[in-house]
Amino acid sequence: MTQSFKRLWLAFPAFIWAGICFYLTLMVLRRPHSTETVILISFVGCAFTVSLSLAWISLGRWVAIGLSSVGLIAVGLAIASIPFGWLGLYFIWFGVLLFLLDRAQKFFESEESTERVLAEKGIEEQNRLQEKLVRRKLSVQTLREKYQAHVSLKEVADDFASTLSLTQLLDLVVKRTAHVINKGELVLVYRVDLESGQPQLIASHGVKQEIKAWSKLGDLFDHWVLKHRQPLLVADAQSDFRFDVMNKHADIPFRCLISSPMINEGRMIGVLRMNSAKVGEFSTDDLRVLSILAVLASSALTNAVLYQKTEEMAISDSLTGLYVHRYFRERLEEEHKRALISNSPFSILMCDIDHFKECNDRFGHASGDLLIKAVSQKLREGVGDNGLVARYGGEEFAIILPGVEKNKAILLAETLRKLIESLHVRTRGEELKATVSIGVASFPVDTLDPEGLLELADKALYKAKNQGRNSVCYNE
């Protein structure tokens, strides 16, 4: 648009000078053979030159030549009244002018073409640099995202290594997984049962989806991961040809999922999984991050399980699986403090297997151990979740009953005595029978002191022994 305006502005004075040329030509024709004719003809030639040059530049070569031909006829008429030499000079000047204008046009066209090529190269270079800049920005952004991801994963690894508590670790795993990936509505952690080899849900995070009963034991997606030991990405659970979802679980509350096996030292220990209600929400990058989190979690989970087993071994009796004497005393102190604060009762039962030494002497220590294990199992079954059963020493057991007053404790003790009395253990082709003597003491009716409570329960136990065994005694 700018170039067109420039041409119009140059064409306008070209026509003005052409008009001046014709006007001067008319003046020459009106005054032939006068002294002013030469001067006017000179002016005509100047006007003709300017008009032709401007027309050449603004309107092009052929328009300028056509316009100059008309001017040439008019000027020729004017010059006809003067000597022939002037007319020859005029035609020579006209030819030289056309030659100069043509060379000038070619020169400027060449310059313009060169400038156009340079401009195009400049534009191409600018575009190339812009594309390179965009790529560099994308590269920097990718590196920044990778760096942030590595930092997040390092923080996750540090968090996982910060605790050996299995409960705290599982809570960290589901929450940090949800935070790092930041997609989906539900995070699930399954642990493989060592006996059955089946997945069992042990932790979850998310409130937007209801966890179905079948999902707590793992679904076909979890079993696929366990079988193939590979990460799994399902963009749409209802249309994935690998899984017959509609026939098995038509009411699934999710559409997209990513799942990764948790493997430690070549052994499958669990599955880490995320669900989403949106089709195609998870990508392969999300699956890659989940796999890294699964590796970190599997190592931390193995350590936490080993620590838990170590703790259980430290507080559990190796023969019976009951709590040891030290742990019993710690729990007694805790229960005593709780009872004082809440003003609630609790009771203690001291149990001893009758005639155990005779059983050992007659049948051997292996049979004695078998009898202790059987009695321990019955005591644990009889108490259930209502109390804590510990092996106090040898064939003696101690039971804490939180929140149980004395009368109820006596009834429970009698139930346990009958349960043990009905026990039959076969060893070396013979059948062993067992009975127990039980002493009962309760807080606060008997005493407010935990040590005094143990002493009273022990005295009641020996009272039952002295009264013929297989009985329950207490302080009246």
Image (cartoon, helix red, strand yellow):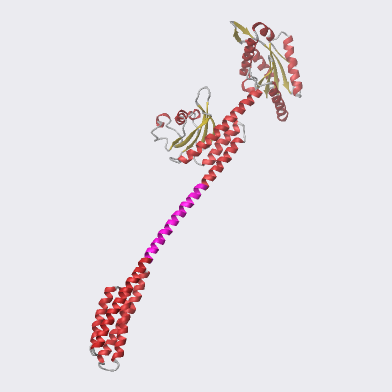
Magenta stretch: includes residue 140: yes
Of the 4 image quadrants, the one containing the C terminus is top right
Is residue 476 visible to us here?
no
Left or right: 214 in relation to 387 = left
Reply above or below: 98 against 38: above
Of residue 132 and residue 95, the one placed in the foreground of this image is: 95
Of residue 218 and residue 13, the one placed in the foreground of this image is: 13
Left or right: 262 in relation to 17 = right
Left or right: 88 in relation to 286 = left
Magenta stretch: includes residue 200: no
**Where, by quadrant of the figure, is residue 221 drawn?**
top left
Reply above or below: 328 against 290: above
Residue 135: horizontal and vertical position, in percent? 46, 51
Is residue 459 visible to us here?
yes
Of residue 342 and residue 289, the one placed in the foreground of this image is: 289
Residue 435: horizontal and vertical position, in percent? 66, 10
Reply above or below: 31 against 283: below
Residue 242: horizontal and vertical position, in percent? 40, 32
Instruction: Name the magenta segment's main secondary structure.
Output: helix
Left or right: 470 in relation to 180 = right
Which region is colored magenta?
A: 115-143
Residue 225: horizontal and vertical position, in percent? 46, 31
Of the 4 image quadrants, the one containing the N terminus is bottom left
**Where, by quadrant of the figure, is residue 402 drawn?**
top right
Give the total number of marks visible in the rendering: 0
